[in-house]
Image: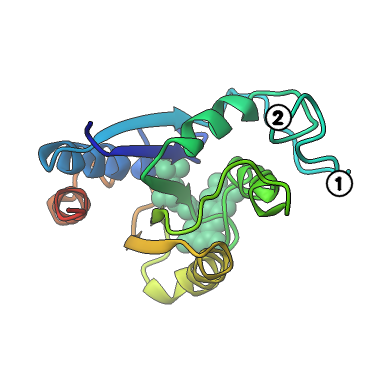
Amino acid sequence: MPKKITVLLGSPRRNGNSDTLAASFSKGAAESGFKASSIRITGLKIGGCIDCRRCWTNRAQHCFLNDDMKDVYAEIDKSDVITFVTPLYFYSWSTQIKPVWDRLLPYFHPKSKVDLKGRRTVLIATAGDDDPSCFDGLKKSFELACDHSKWEIAGLLLAPGLHDANEAQNSEEWLKRAFDMGKNLG
Ligand SMILES: Cc1cc2nc3c(=O)[nH]c(=O)nc-3n(C[C@H](O)[C@H](O)[C@H](O)COP(=O)(O)O)c2cc1C
């Protein structure tokens, strides 16, 4: 069985910079035998966590809310590598992907039926700013979340200087770095 990667696409901009780098990453990962499947979050109905403390109480499903997050849970449950893809929005996660993070709460519930400890994870982020320090807050957020989740960070691709939607497509350097990160996942 090939190892499975779930790629959570967090930009509302189809074929924009983060999509492009995620596609290149997936191609590289496919070359080293992974099966990557992408989920475009934009267009899905995924509400924010409402802190109802009813994880696993609705017919033993992860979350009490009945929305498209159930499809994301199903993919994450069986993933070896979970990849978060986001444009930098005000030094943080995109509006689209942040609710997905919050809805991971059921996995940390004492009654969780799925143990994600030890899973591998990747972050791909793009930003308009040329200064790589613009990612400091996002990177810290990711690292703390992975530490809390006991996930191993298998790759970090933080690409600054990409503003217009087609800039990643025209950057051989970033396309190659994304591809290589996928190929070297091992
Ligand atoms: C609402 C919003 C907030 C943004 N905030 C930042 C920011 O804080 N720093 C930055 O460098 N770029 C910021 N950007 C620019 C995007 O991060 C950048 O264009 C990115 O490459 C877009 O990726 P995409 O094409 O995958 O959507 C912002 C863009 C939007 C729409």
Residue 144: image location, x then y, percent: 56, 71
Task: Identify the colour scheme used.
Answer: rainbow
Left/right of residue 126 with respect to residue 173 in the rendered view: right
In the rendered picture of this protein, how many numbered marks are placed on residues?
2
Query: What residue is drawn where x is 17% and y is 53%?
Result: 186
Query: What residue is drawn where x is 50% and y is 41%?
Result: 10
Please give the residue where the numbered disc 2 appears in the rendered image: 61
Please give the residue where the numbered disc 1 appears in the rendered image: 53
Whole-angstrom CA distance, mark 1 to mark 2, is: 13 Å
SS category of the residue bearing label 1: loop
Q: Amino acid at mark 1?
A: Arg
Q: Nearer the viewer, residue 46 or 175?
A: 46
If you read the primary sequence from the N terminus, does the residue marked by circle 1 or circle 2 appear first?
Answer: 1
Residue 119: image location, x then y, percent: 42, 54
Query: What residue is drawn where x is 57% and y is 67%?
Result: 141
Viewer can see residue 166: no
Viewer can see residue 74: yes
Q: Where does the N terminus fall, quadrant-wise?
A: top left
Q: In the image, is residue 110 above or below residue 80?
A: below
SS category of the residue bearing label 2: loop
Left/right of residue 55 with respect to residue 146 in the rendered view: right
Q: In the image, is residue 58 above or below residue 85?
A: above
Left/right of residue 44 with respect to residue 133 in the rendered view: right
Residue 108: image location, x then y, percent: 67, 54
Query: What residue is drawn where x is 16% and y is 43%?
Result: 28
Q: Amino acid at mark 2?
A: Gln
Mark 2: C-beta under 8 Å from nearest atom of ligand 1: no
Q: Nearer the viewer, residue 150 or 163?
A: 150
